[in-house]
Every structure is written in C-alpha cells, then in structure tokens.
Amino acid sequence: MPKRALVERRPWLVASVLLALVTTWLQSSRLADPYLMGLAAGPFVLLGIYAALRQRGRNTGLLAAMVGLEGLGWALVTLSPDFAVMALWLAFLAGLSLFLQHRVTAPQVDRRIAAAALLLGTPVLCVAAGGMAMLVLGLALGAMAASAWISTFPRERVGAGGLLIVAGMLMAMIDTGGIEASGRWLALAAWPVAYLGNLVLATGVTGELRAREAFDEI
C-alpha cells in the first residue's frame, strides 16, 4: 500500500519539477506577464499538493500552505508587490509554525549559533537588499530558516532548503542599480534557487515524517 500510494502521488512531484524547468527556461523570454505569473506559481502549487498528499495531517498541511503561499507571492511580485510580500510573509509564518512543533529541545552549540545568525542576519540582509519595507518579511524569513535549522528534521535537506529559500529571496530583493549584467543574472537565478530550496525542504520533511510513521508502525 505505501508503494502504491507513492506511485499515485509521485506524478505531482514530477510535474512540479518539469514545470519548474520550463519556467526557468522561459524567464528571460518575452512571454506575457499573466502567463509568467501562472508559470511562477504552478511548480509551487504542484509541490504543495504533493506534500499534502504524501502524508495527510497538520504537519503537511502547514508545509503545503507554506509552499503554496510562496508560489502565490512569486506570481504577484510584478502585479502587486504589497500582496506578494503579504503572501510570502504568511508562507514563512506557516513554515515557522511547522518547525517550532518539531524543534530540538537542547540543540548543539553550533546549531544555536547558525540559527541565531539566520534569525538576526536575514532581516539585516533583507533591509540592505530591498530597504526597510523588507524588514518584516525578513524577520519571518529568518525565523523560518532558523527554526528549520534547529528542528528535528535532517539539516542536510530541510536546513539546507531553508538556506536556499533565504538566498533566493535575497537575490530577488537586491537593488542592482547600474550593475545591469550582474543584476540580470541575479534576477533570473532568484526564482529557481527559491524553488530548489522548497523542493529540497518539502521532500526532506515529508520523507522524514513517512520514516517516523513507518517506525511507529513496527
């Protein structure tokens, strides 16, 4: 039954990755904004559906909300920046809520230092990249990444995924000024990096939850 369920849900993951590749390829094209908005949101929505179906419950519900709201935020960036920021802020709060439920009670010193650096450093970098308007979003983003890093989920996947999401968001916020070539590449890399972070994080969370469930059934 578990293998059959995985086969039934894997197409959502495969479709998400394939659409993400298409979106990355078409970013620099002259495709109309409505189509680009749909392409930006689509991979995140499909990934959220996969997460929700992989193991149903509050944990994956929060994970799906985080991923789906991020997709909405990326889709609204050019149309309505204020609503985009609000959607992303809610997304990171959903992620924070998830990881706080699975926090390590006594994390090692190196993990505490890394989490503190993410919690305090992320909003500072967000303000430096996008101005004071990004402070509140940076606080939520940093808290999400920090809580992922000190959660009971594997750092090499979930923690690393949080770092990639931070990197992608910072790339999107950077005001490139006169550095046109560098700015163009940063702008083009922002969405793929953020998506990759969500992909690594989401599969890490769902995989760990499934492993724990299987262990409990033994």
Image: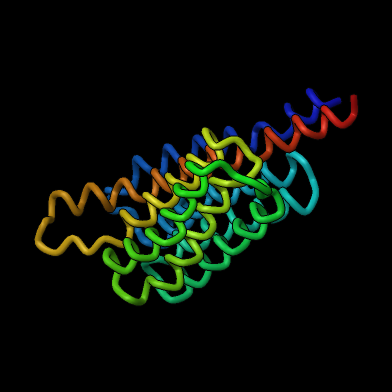
Say which residue appears at 60% left-offset and 42% top-offset. Answer: 202
The image quadrant where one finds the N terminus is: top right
Q: Is residue 210 left or right of residue 203?
A: right
Q: Nearer the viewer, residue 153 or 7?
A: 153
Q: Nearer the viewer, residue 201 or 34?
A: 201
Name the spot of residue 215 as percent of width and height, x first: 83, 28
Q: Nearer the viewer, residue 185 or 197?
A: 197
Image quadrant assignment for residue 192: top left
Q: Nearer the viewer, residue 105 or 47?
A: 105
Say which residue appears at 38% left-offset and 50% top-offset. Answer: 168
Say which residue appears at 63% left-offset and 48% top-offset. Answer: 48
Name the spot of residue 51 as percent of width and height, x first: 67, 43
Q: Is residue 32 left or right of residue 141?
A: left
Numbered-mark total? 0
Instruction: Give the colour scheme of this rendering.
Output: rainbow
Name the spot of residue 112 as percent of width and height, x first: 51, 49
Name the spot of residue 63 as percent of width and height, x first: 65, 51
Q: Is residue 180 left or right of residue 131?
A: left
Seen in the picture, residue 78 relative to 14 is either above or below; the reply is below
Say which residue appears at 42% left-offset and 65% top-offset. Answer: 138
